Image (cartoon, rainbow, N blue to C red):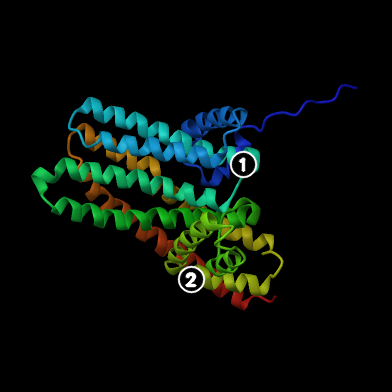
Amino acid sequence: MMEKTPTKMSMESTLKSLDTEEFIDLHFYRPIGYRWALLFEKLNIPPNAVTIFAIIIGIAAGFCFFYTSLTVNVAGMILLVWANMYDSADGQLARMTGKKSQLGRTLDGLCGVVWFVAIYAAICCRLTPTWGYWIWVLAATTGFFHVKQTTMADYYRNIHLFFLIGSSGSELSDSAQLRENTKQKTWKHDFINKISDFNYIRYTKDQESMSPRFRQMIHLVRQKFPEEAPEWFRAAFREKSLPLMKYTNILSFNTRVIALFVLLFINLPWLYFIFELTVMNAILIYMIVSHERICTDFTIQLSTEPS
């Protein structure tokens, strides 16, 4: 009998979960990112290098939005789409090759932040002759809330994945455990990883500070079920959490860039800041309030359930 030759991972196997995939990602970025990932795997390029490529391309895209020329702006849009293809490919490549790391997750989180810092700065430089320093104040305020929006969207996706797939398929972290882990590393031998860990601990603490009811619920779950939460609880939580996944996707990349591109086409880029401060913050508040209410209900239920 002939031996079967190993086959490549399918595109679907490089996804975290269909529950958490956004429509444009699933039908555009993931298929293209998968093909990039196959090429990078063949060239033996690691996922972290792909993330760095994405960061550089995204910064170049941001610079293009300084100019009032629509042609240059469109070039920036194309570069930003290209950067996001690589940002999709790095995670898919990591899952294909098993080369996942804390540093990689930190770089991946940094990627989108750097892109939008470049975009915000370019728009501010473009508008300073008209707005003066006030446009920088508006951008800084928007940036503060932008980070909160993407931070919590990422957190809620990972909570959902934790109850869907378990710890192996989720990047849900605990700041206390992260602190213990980083104590085992030395500055002499793990300098880069220590820096990465400190940034990631701060990021995780920020998520935890905005989800006290979830922290209360997960603490109770781990007390009552030290091994693993029972399937009835996991299924019930997923059912309540699933409708919120569409909001986590809205707060991610695609909705933002669609709004940005439209406003650049009509030469009103300052309205992008207003969009983030109003529409996106309203979604953030709704998402937090809804998720905390779900967690409160489950905490009450678990408190009355026998162990």
Q: What residue type is labelled 1?
A: Arg
The residue sitting at 46% across, 62% down in the picture is: 291
Q: 184 left or right of 209? A: right
Q: Position of residue 167 (x, y in %)?
A: 63, 56
**Picture layout, residue 104 above or below residue 294:** above
* Residue at which label 2 appears: 213
Which corner quadrant of the image does residue 286 belong to? bottom left
Query: What quarter of the picture does the N terminus occupy?
Result: top right
The residue sitting at 23% across, 25% down in the picture is: 71
Instruction: Pick the residue in front: 129 or 280.
Output: 129
Q: Position of residue 264 (x, y in %)?
A: 23, 35
**Picture layout, residue 267 above or below residue 182:** above
Q: Residue furthest front?
A: 188
Local packing at callout 2 (Cα closer than 10 Å; few below 14, some 14-19, many 20+) is: many
Query: What quarter of the picture does the C terminus occupy?
Result: bottom right
The residue sitting at 31% across, 47% down in the picture is: 117
Q: Which amino acid does label 2 sit on?
A: Arg
Q: Residue furthest top?
A: 2
Q: Which of marks 2 and 1 is in front?
A: 1
Say if mark 2 contacts mark 1, CB within 8 Å.
no
